[in-house]
Image (spheres, rainbow, N blue to C red):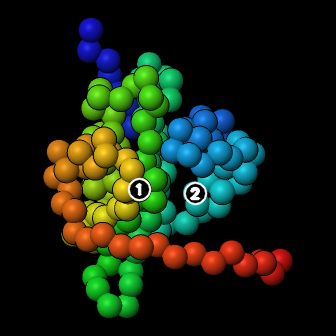
Amino acid sequence: MERTVAVRPAVPEDDAFLAKLAGQLGYAEEPARVRTRLEDLMKRADHVVYVAEIAGEGAGWVHAFLYQPLHKEKMVEIAGLVVEEGCRRMGIGRRLLAAVEEWAKTQGCAQVCLGSNIVRKGAHQFYQRAGYELSKTQYIFKKQMQAEV
């Protein structure tokens, strides 16, 4: 039986689902904090969050944003994409990528990029099958600081 996948913009009421799947990515977060961030992102024209559903149930999400560095052309970067473990290999990830790619075109971007943890071999294969090319490897550095409120 063919299952129809619907992709739509995320809404604040998706907070528990978004948080649950963030946990599957390895980023445990409280739904209330996810809701606050989502509400902020929804006010910004340079960010999108899409949810994929099957029969009204959440099956995946993607967050993307406009990235405009000084030294190269504006592009869209995927900040996160995750499909529910029990729903993988059903075309949901491709549908989410397609939604981001269409949004990128409307933003005047000719490129979508993303980073993927080196240990996520299955994700790398998925992106390559979807037409994404490995362009470089790099180290990511971070520094924890005290935020001024």
**Camera-side residue of 85 and 45:** 85
Q: Position of residue 133 (x, y in %)?
A: 18, 60
Name the residue tied to disc 2.
Answer: 42
Mark on residue 117?
Answer: 1
The label nearer to you, 1 versus 2, is 1
What amino acid does circle 2 point to? Met
Q: Would residue 98 be visible to someone looking at this image?
A: no
Residue sitting at x 58%, y 60%: 41
Residue sitting at x 29%, y 63%: 112
**Mark 2 burial class by Cα count in 10 Å: few <14, some 14-19, many 20+:** some
**Camera-side residue of 22 and 46:** 22
In the image, residue 97 above or below residue 56:
below
Dot 2: element: helix
Q: Position of residue 48 (x, y in %)?
A: 47, 56
> Which image quarter is the N terminus in?
top left
Mark 1 or mark 2: which comes first in sequence?
A: 2
What amino acid does circle 1 point to? Asn
Residue sitting at x 77%, y 77%: 147
Quarter of the view holding residue 132: bottom left
Q: Position of residue 21 (x, y in %)?
A: 54, 38
In the image, residue 81 above or below residue 114:
above
